[in-house]
Image: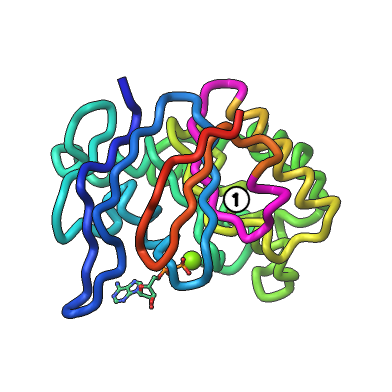
Amino acid sequence: MSILKFNKVNFTDGEKTILKDINFEIKKGDYVTIVGPSGSGKSTLLKLCNNLISPSDGSIYYNDKNITEYNPVDLRKDISYCLQIPHLFGETVMDNLSFPFKIRNAKINMDKIHELTYKFKIRKNILDEKIINLSGGEKQRISLMRTLMHTPDVLLLDEVTSSLDVENTSIVEDIVKDLNDKGVTILWITHDMEQSFKYANKRINLNSGELKELEVIK
Ligand SMILES: Nc1ncnc2c1ncn2[C@@H]1O[C@H](COP(=O)(O)OP(=O)(O)O)[C@@H](O)[C@H]1O
Ligand SMILES: [Mg+2]
């Protein structure tokens, strides 16, 4: 059984074909990296996975059920997406980290917030910091921490280490590897060839909206 399956998926915008006849299957626990030139359709492919956008043709299945049959809000709790350009809101870091609890009508779990702050090795005084005072790399990590406040079934990452230095990139790679070891399925867009091979067992290589093969690398 596959956790995610694309069957003859096309995505077009008017005359322009952005993704063409995409077919692949991903199994639970796979760690898939997605590579390809800018504009090849990588972000479009990820947005299709949790129904942020819909295919023009073809079908996408999550646990063998068409994703259109899921409630979109529930689907996005199971399949979460961390954006290429972090979108933080409100005034402070805490406004962002408490958000995942608020949308679930749950009590804010400070232990979880502190656990992730520790794992990401991010400065402890950051919680009360104003968003406008954060560096690009801090914004990227806060956005990822917000995504990981609840562990998803499938984690979609769009170039989430592009503003991070080598050390912080490695911290994020290890956190994601640890989640994968615990059973989380990973789809990670990266421009970094070394990163695309480091922990992944499969690789998607997109070129002008086409996928030749799902490369098995481990
Ligand atoms: N919703 C959309 N409507 C029209 N064009 C789009 C849309 N989304 C992406 N594109 C175009 O589709 C192509 C692929 O975009 P994208 O998926 O962002 O590529 P990548 O992430 O590989 O850089 C680009 O030419 C982009 O301009
Ligand atoms: Mg992109």
Quadrant that contains the N terminus: top left
- Label 1 belongs to which residue? 144
Amino acid type, mark 1: Leu
Tell me if residue 88 can be seen.
no
Residue 187, above or below 30:
below
Tell me if residue 58 can be seen.
yes
Q: Is residue 193 magenta?
A: yes
Q: Which residues make up the magenta segment? A: 181-196
Residue drawn at point x = 61 percent, y = 36 percent: 200
As helix, strand or loop, the secondary structure at mark 1 comes to helix
Q: Is residue 89 left or right of residue 66?
A: right
Q: Is residue 62 left or right of residue 216?
A: left
Residues packed near mark 1 inside 10 Å, few (<14), some (14 to 19) or many (20 plus): many
Q: Position of residue 57 (x, y in %)?
A: 14, 56
Residue drawn at point x = 43 percent, y = 44 percent: 80
Q: Is residue 11 magenta?
A: no
Which corner quadrant of the figure contains ligand 1?
bottom left
Residue drawn at point x = 28 percent, y = 27 percent: 63
Q: Pick out the residue farthest to the bottom.
A: 15
Residue drawn at point x = 68 percent, y = 57 percent: 192
Q: Position of residue 79 (x, y in %)?
A: 39, 40
Q: Is residue 17 left or right of residue 190?
A: left
Res. 113 image quadrant: top right
Q: Nearer the viewer, residue 77 or 127?
A: 77
